């Protein structure tokens, strides 16, 4: 297994997690419901997050398949 590639994938996963986690969680503990624009933004962020996770997983599976 290519340890350098595995390390790169781990670092990329941490980067993606850092970038999206705070964007997907509700802001503060307010009881106010988000508006349609905010919900749409969160939905786009979630879709982007899912795509990046899928791409990272596919790279990991390809790396594991090399062995």
Image (cartoon, rainbow, N blue to C red):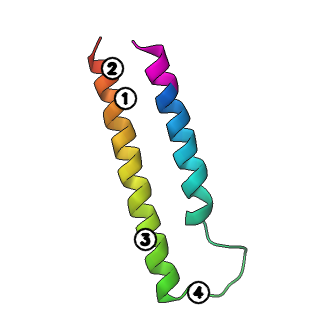
Relative side of 46 to 14, left or right: left
Q: What element carries label 2?
A: helix
In the picture of the structure, the residue carrying the numbered disc 3 is 43
Dominant secondary structure, magenta: helix
Pointers 1 and 3 in contact (CB under 8 A)? no
Answer whether labels 4 and 2 touch (C-beta < 8 Å): no
Between residues 30 and 51, which one lies in front from this camera angle? 51
Mark sitting earlier along the chain (3/2): 3
Categorize mark 4 by other alpha carbons within 10 Å: few (<14), some (14-19), many (20+).
Answer: few
Q: Distance between the residues labelled 3 and 2?
A: 31 Å
For the residues labelled 2 and 1, say whether their Cβ atoms are less than 8 Å apart.
yes
**SS for tag 3?**
helix
In the drawing, what numbered circle is on residue 60?
A: 1
Q: Does the magenta-highlighted stretch encompass residue 48? A: no
Residue drawn where x is 43% and y is 78% of the image: 40
Image quadrant in which you'd find residue 63: top left
Q: Which mark is residue 33?
A: 4
Mark closer to the observer (4, 1): 1
Residue 53, percent from left and from top: 41, 46
Q: Earlier in the sequence, mark 1 or mark 3?
A: 3
> Residue 15 appears at what percent x and percent y?
56, 44
Residue positioned 72% across, 75% down in the render:
29
Would you say residue 5 sits in the magenta stretch? yes
- The quarter in which the C terminus is drawn is top left
Picture layout, residue 33 above or below residue 48: below
Q: Give the range drawn in magenta.
A: 1-7
User: What x and y, as percent, mark residue 51?
Assistant: 35, 52
Marks 1/3: CA distance?
26 Å
Q: Are marks 3 and 2 in contact (CB under 8 Å)?
A: no
- Disc 2 designates what residue? 64
């Amino acid at each position: 297994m290519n340890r350098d590639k595995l390390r790169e994938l781990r670092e990329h996963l941490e980067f993606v997690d850092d970038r999206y986690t705070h964007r997907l969680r509700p802001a503060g503990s307010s009881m106010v419901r988000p508006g349609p624009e905010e919900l749409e933004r969160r939905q786009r962020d979630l879709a982007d997050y899912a795509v990046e996770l899928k791409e990272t997983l596919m790279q990991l599976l390809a790396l594991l398949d090399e062995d």
